[in-house]
Image (cartoon, grey):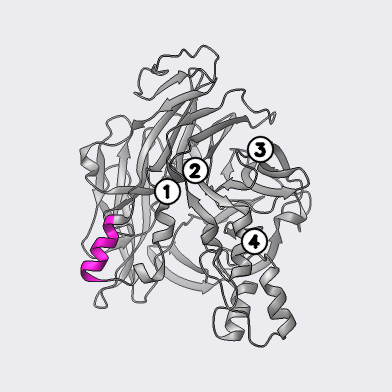
Amino acid sequence: MALMHNFKIENGSVTYMSKFLQSESYTENKRANRIVVSEFGTLAMPDPCQSMYDRFMSKFKLTSTDNCSVNYVLYKGDYYVSTETNFMRRVAPETLDTLEKVDWTKFIAVNSATAHPHYDPDGTVYNMGNSFGKEGTRYNIIRVPPQKSSAGETLEGAQVVCSIEPAEKIKLAYYHSFGMSENYVVFVEQPVKINLLKLFLCRIQGKALLNSISWDPELNTVFHVINKHTGKKHSATFHTKAFATFHQINAFEDQGCIVLDLCCMDDGGALDLFNLPNLRKSGKELNEFRKQVAKSYPRRFVLPLDSGIKDVATQPLSYSSATAAMKGDGKIWCTYENLYDHTLGSSGFEFPQINYAKYNGKKYRYFYGCGFQDIIGDSLVKMDVETKQAKIWKEDGYFPSEPIFVPYPDIVGEDDGVILSAVITPDQNKNIFLLILDAKDFTELARAEVPVEIPYGFHGVFVPQRT
């Protein structure tokens, strides 16, 4: 269940608190004293207190969870916690109190939305969500206005900017995030597919929804480029060999091209491996499991927007080795540039963050993330796009969370700020702690130890003190 954490830094001291999100899913599970609400990888048995008819009919209902355990997002000045269903919960970041439940389907024709929206400088929010309607299945780009017209507003004014038809009508690409530059949204249609027929069958057969997702390495990964102001889709589609991705790093426009930086895996079957029996392994079995998990690495693609692409692979930008070529079928075939060198070692890289407020959608130099020498992140990494060299923070036996970049108030350079990360350990004799690194040289400035256990998490946000 979604557990929210809050480190408060004030007057030279740090306090910690945590609360379970008081979602309807949490309330039902707590009342039954076990998991009775199905999640992404868990099909729960129905509550025995239900009637026989209700338990039978529950097999045929595709209900969504409001267990919003993935990310904190911001709409119209309000903070929400989000997952990948149609529900969000508004929360108070200062107290972690759970507020109203918000349903995307009440405002716009989508059945879900990602937990990784993008923000324009004026507060306009862009997101993506699927829809299943009379016109078939679609990937939808969503825009939410930056301001409220009344105090009680949530998602009023949201609209679909563009709808994209999937390559296969009954197989939707799974996506966790998307790219956005100053003028364009880039949707990555990857060969990690959700089979809609299997989605319904899994419910009837008593299987988790995860069983409807498969990896097809014979397919291409396709980049769709949409003008976010007009909603018009670019006439060309950009193709590359199959890869899987969860998180984009940044995207920007330069010399008639879109530069798209992503965390990429060559094997998209990793989702199947992360189940409880595998995670509970130890010793030799655990080591064998580690070898099976595909590593994710930062890569750059360059998507040329003009029509002068030739049939010979060329580098559209002089400072990137990424190439593009026009194929006989009219598709533009792209190859990538690696954004790392030997200093990253054999560690994978995920949970990317940048100086978002100043450099999202702009040409940039630095990004931060977790190194994955283990099953979960076991180091913090600062990558330099120009030199491709990594700076690494690591302590044996500790596992840091996604690094959050916080700029100094009088920022001059791109990396003028600090990195925040919650570092956990399974060692009962050691404390977890909030780590603060200098973002420029990646050295430790401070740590605040917390004498309680907290679990490994996904994403976080820095909320400046309101005045």
Report helix, strand or loop for mark 4.
helix
State the separation of the CA atoms marked 2 and 4: 20 Å
Locate residue 367, reporting x and y percent: 37, 41
| 106 with respect to 270 (left or right) | right
Residue type at mark 4 is Phe
Check contact, mark 4 vs mark 1: CB within 8 A: no
Within 10 Å of the Cα at label 1, are there few (<14), some (14-19), or many (20+) other Cα atoms? Answer: many
- Of the numbered discs 4 and 3, the one sitting upstream in the chain is 3
Locate residue 216, reporting x and y percent: 47, 45
Locate residue 84, reporting x and y percent: 58, 56
Residue type at mark 2 is Pro
| 133 with respect to 454 (left or right) | right
Locate residue 272, reporting x and y percent: 43, 59
- Residue at image position (67%, 50%) is 76
Majority secondary structure in the magenta region: helix
Report helix, strand or loop for mark 2.
loop
| Residue 200 disc label | 4
Residue receiving disc 3:
165
Check contact, mark 2 vs mark 1: CB within 8 A: yes
Residue receiving disc 1:
268
State the separation of the CA atoms marked 2 and 1: 8 Å
State the separation of the CA atoms marked 1 and 3: 22 Å
